[in-house]
Image (tube, grey):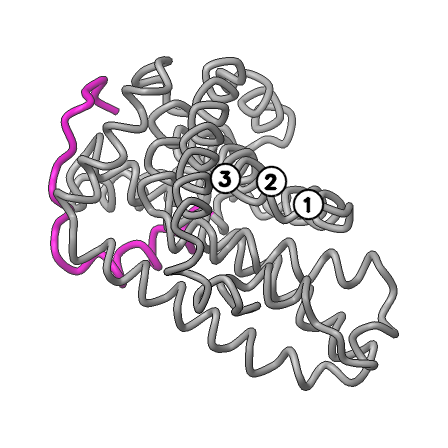
Amino acid sequence: MAASLKPQPVESGWLLRWWRDSLILLRASPRSFALLYLVLLLLNIAWQPLILSIPISCIVMAIIFAVAMAIHQGSTQITDVGRSIRDVPWWPLLRLILEIALLVAALLMLMLMFRHYLQGIFSQDHISSAATLHNLKSADWQKLPDWLRSLITNALGTAQTMLGNAFLLLSVGVIVTGITQRGYLALLAGFQAVLANVRVWLAFLLASLMLQGVITFISARLHTYAAALLVSLVGVALLILVGLYGWCFVRETFGLPGAQVAKQATALARKNAAAHA
């Protein structure tokens, strides 16, 4: 990947191309993604405060990006993939998250200053998927065990957070790929990449709003333990898919054009198939 902070426009046909690339990555190392699924399952079972949803989402995306990057580079063994997660520049990433947290805090303070004019927005419980589920008061929802409620809320909330904030997703990707280790430059690059790919950003934003609508719809229909468990398992799978799409977005915006990426991914798949033959 070119070590450049200058974002490039994504080639057309990205929706289907990234779907194919995601499937190629999944097939290249299914055991790694199965282990990743279990890791995310355990992480999302833990209670996560709503105010930390963005920092936590950034960390989750960094883990998914590290796995996808390792597999894309040909490291399909679980030990190699694990080392790639270990080698993520965590300190620069944490500095980026701190800068994001300060930015969010400043925005919240600004919103509080104008709370009289924004009280109509603040009075709504469904600003995000996580907020919607955190504030559910139905008897059926309250009967579910805490770990299951956390799993549903965290998995779907993180997926929607990253879809709705594509610039954060791109900023995390710039750090993970080692293009820069300066948080403010990564954040600036994320904003520039969104501006260079407005149509992709709008599609991600629309997907975020659609996910919010789905959550609002099903939140009142989680009447049984089995239904809630199914939603949670699908939610973790959706989170991985969002991460893979995010990786493809980062890879094409700051690295190879889509056609070259697809060619490399196909070559990787053929190489892995020959190795296992």
State the residue position of label 1: 49
Q: Is residue 219 above or below residue 77?
A: below
Q: Could you say which quadrant of the image residue 177 lies in?
A: top left
Report the amino acid beneath label 2: Leu
Q: Is residue 140 above or below residue 64?
A: below
Report the amino acid beneath label 1: Pro
User: SS at mark 1?
Assistant: loop
State the residue position of label 2: 52
Tell whether label 1 touches label 2 (CB within 8 Å).
yes
Residue 128 position within the rendered picture, expressed as x and y whole percent measured from the top left: 51, 62
* Residue closest to the eye, 116 or 70: 116
Position of 146 compared to 253: left or right?
right
Residue 203 position within the rendered picture, expressed as x and y whole percent measured from the top left: 26, 62
Q: Is residue 195 above or below residue 174?
A: below
Position of 183 compared to 149: left or right?
left
Q: Nearer the viewer, mark 3 or mark 1?
A: 1
State the residue position of label 3: 61
Residue 58 position within the rendered picture, expressed as x and y whole percent measured from the top left: 50, 36
**Which range is magenta?**
1-25
